[in-house]
Image (cartoon, rainbow, N blue to C red):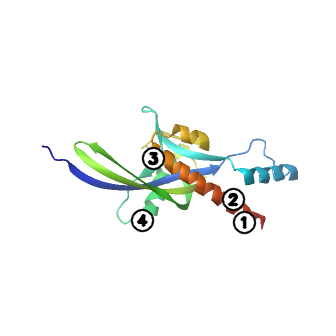
Amino acid sequence: MERHQTIRAYSAGGVVFRLAPVPGQNNNNARADFQLKREASERTPVEVALVGRSQQGMWTLPKGTPRSGETIEQVAVREVQEETGLEVQLITYIGLISYSFIRDQVRFYKQVRHFLFEAVGGDISLHDHEYDSVAWFPLPEAFRHLTYQNEVNILTQAEEILQRWLARRQKERQT
């Protein structure tokens, strides 16, 4: 019986969002501003950045492995920024996924910690070479494009956290 070597691997990444631009938005118009506030309080349109490999038709959340001395949060920020080309601000922890795979007769047990990030700058055209595509998707489309179910589950958790965070932020702005 052949014995496989086992390796435990850790990585971190997350869900990067931005508030979707509202077509025809005119902030100088009080009526439009009221409408925008009403819509924001109902449900703010959100877009999510996904990274992909065109040839395989794969879309995933950005993530990567730690460098020596990095905290898990530092890994997540660095990897998300490198893979998407975006400058991000960490909002909060979302959750953990675990899975295993075999490569070259080595079984890997991998844990990935995911965080919620707001895009605050940068440009998706500035992403690194690890993925050949980075794109913004409206949240409902992001769910449909993700290749792995465990990442769909993370995105579901992120959506719940994000809606609470946006509601809290909206309330703070009104006071």
**Which comes before the other along the chain, label 2 or label 3?**
3
Crowd tier of the residue under label 4, counting other residues whose Cα lies within 10 Å: few below 14, some 14–19, many 20 or above:
few
Dot 4 falls on a residue whose secondary structure is loop
Dot 2 falls on a residue whose secondary structure is helix
Q: CA distance from mark 2 to mark 3?
A: 26 Å
Instruction: Answer yes or no: is residue 99 visible.
Output: yes
Crowd tier of the residue under label 1, counting other residues whose Cα lies within 10 Å: few below 14, some 14–19, many 20 or above:
few
The three-letter code of the residue at mark 1 reads Glu
The disc label shown at residue 71, or none: 4
Residue at 59% in and 54% down: 160
Residue tagged 2: 167
Crowd tier of the residue under label 2, counting other residues whose Cα lies within 10 Å: few below 14, some 14–19, many 20 or above:
some
The disc label shown at residue 33, or none: none
Residue 129 placed where, x, y %? 43, 43
Residue tagged 1: 172
Dot 3 falls on a residue whose secondary structure is helix
Mark closer to the observer (4, 2): 2
**Which comes before the other along the chain, label 1 or label 2?**
2
Mark closer to the observer (3, 1): 3
Residue at 29% in and 55% down: 8
Dot 1 falls on a residue whose secondary structure is helix
**Which comes before the other along the chain, label 1 or label 4?**
4
Q: Quadrant of residue 12?
A: bottom left
Could you tell whether 106 is left or right of 100 in the image? left
Residue tagged 3: 150
Camera-side residue: 6 or 129? 6
Q: Quadrant of residue 91?
A: bottom right
Camera-side residue: 155 or 62? 155
The three-letter code of the residue at mark 3 reads Asn
**Which comes before the other along the chain, label 4 or label 2?**
4
